[in-house]
């Protein structure tokens, strides 16, 4: 295949928050693409380990990142951006949590944009990375774009998962997702997911509230209204490489979702 892909990750977005927030574009994604509210993330259900498992398609015991502090891999393996670079594909990276800078090796992405959530506030930083990602897609039409939205996780830690403020942050994040979707050329597949959920004002445990994540995929390869069965966060990188016509790394443990 030779599709293009835009991946949006909403940090800390629990599946059961979606029906509560009631954003109309959520139902559009379910109706027009494939989805699941029962995908699994990895333990520990912490932001950087979960992202490393998403981008490298291995569990934390393999990549070695167990906290939100990056350490070099003792036994290196290529992640998603490195595999796309080998296939001569272009990638863009738009994020507002600085620790994600090590998900891609230097030189493997065509454009990187960081808007600090601590400086701007995460709600504004979400809007900034959304605006820049939309401009980049319209200007360059790259093969792969990653957009990280950190507002929901920040609201969960400040006010509690499933609090009124948390639900408002989920709705605001879907405003950003809808704006991104409206800007995408026809050849793009849109993937929306989360890294983990949360409970009370925390996450990182093996509780279902922490470990269960949603995945939405809207594109030509995915049947409208269908269910993604037995999906995990480690399946996302193999799905993207298959869509864009690149090869997965030999060490990857996930499987394509189509």
Image (cartoon, rainbow, N blue to C red):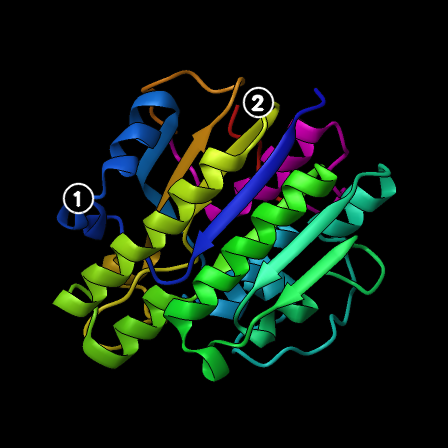
The disc at residue 163 is none
Residue 249: image x %, image y %?
A: 75, 43
- Give the percent coordinates (x, y) of residue 64: 63, 70
58 with respect to 214 (left or right)? right
Q: Is 146 situated left or right of 175 in this image? A: right
In this view, the residue in front, 39 or 145, is 145
Label annotation for residue 22: 1
Residue 163 visible in the shown view: no
Dot 1: what SS?
loop
The image quarter containing residue 242 is top right
- In the image, residue 119 above or below residue 186: below
Q: Regarding mark 2 in the picture, which secondary structure is present there?
A: loop
State how many labels appear: 2
Q: Specify start and end residues of the magenta stretch as a single range.
A: 229-252
Q: Write the residue at 64% across / 42% down.
A: 137
Identify which residue is drawn at 30% across, 56% down: 172
Q: Residue at x 66, y 25 (%)?
A: 3
Q: Residue at the spot x=41%, y=53% of the render?
A: 194
Which of these two is toward me, 29 or 73? 29
**Is residue 94 one of those drawn in magenta?**
no
| Membership of 234 in magenta stretch | yes
Image x and y of residue 245, in percent:
74, 27
- Which dot, 1 or 2, sits closer to the camera? 2
Dot 1 or dot 2, earlier in sequence: 1
Label 1 crowding class (10 Å Cα cut-off): few <14, some 14-19, many 20+?
Answer: some
Q: In this view, does 248 lie above or below 227?
A: below
Label 2: how many residues lie within 10 Å, few (<14), some (14-19) or many (20+)?
A: few
The label on residue 186 is: 2
- Is 186 located above or below residue 58 in the figure? above
Does any portion of residue 19 appear in the rendered image?
yes
| Left or right side of 208 for 101 | right
């Amino acid at each position: 295949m030779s599709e293009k892909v835009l991946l949006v990750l909403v940090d800390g977005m629990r599946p059961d928050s979606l029906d509560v927030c009631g954003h109309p574009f959520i139902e559009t994604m379910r109706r027009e693409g494939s989805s699941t509210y029962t995908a699994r993330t990895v333990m520990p259900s912490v932001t950087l380990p979960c992202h490393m498992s998403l981008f490298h398609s291995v569990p934390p015991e393999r990549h070695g990142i167990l906290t939100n502090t990056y350490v070099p891999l003792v036994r290196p393996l290529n992640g998603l951006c490195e595999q796309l670079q080998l296939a001569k594909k272009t990638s863009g990276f738009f994020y507002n949590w600085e620790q994600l800078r090590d998900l891609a090796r230097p030189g493997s992405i065509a454009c990187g944009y960081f808007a600090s959530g601590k400086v701007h506030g995460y709600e504004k930083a979400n809007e900034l990375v959304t605006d820049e990602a939309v401009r980049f897609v319209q200007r360059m039409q790259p093969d792969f774009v990653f957009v990280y939205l950190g507002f929901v996780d920040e609201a969960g830690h400040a006010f509690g998962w499933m609090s009124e403020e948390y639900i408002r942050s989920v709705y605001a994040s879907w405003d950003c997702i809808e704006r991104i979707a409206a800007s995408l050329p026809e050849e793009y597949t849109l993937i929306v997911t989360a890294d983990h959920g949360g409970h009370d004002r925390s996450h990182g445990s093996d509780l279902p509230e922490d470990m269960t994540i949603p995945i939405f995929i809207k594109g030509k390869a995915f049947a409208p209204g269908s269910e993604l069965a037995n999906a995990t966060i480690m399946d996302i990188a193999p799905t993207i490489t298959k869509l864009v016509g690149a090869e997965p790394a030999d060490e990857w443990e996930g499987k394509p979702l189509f």
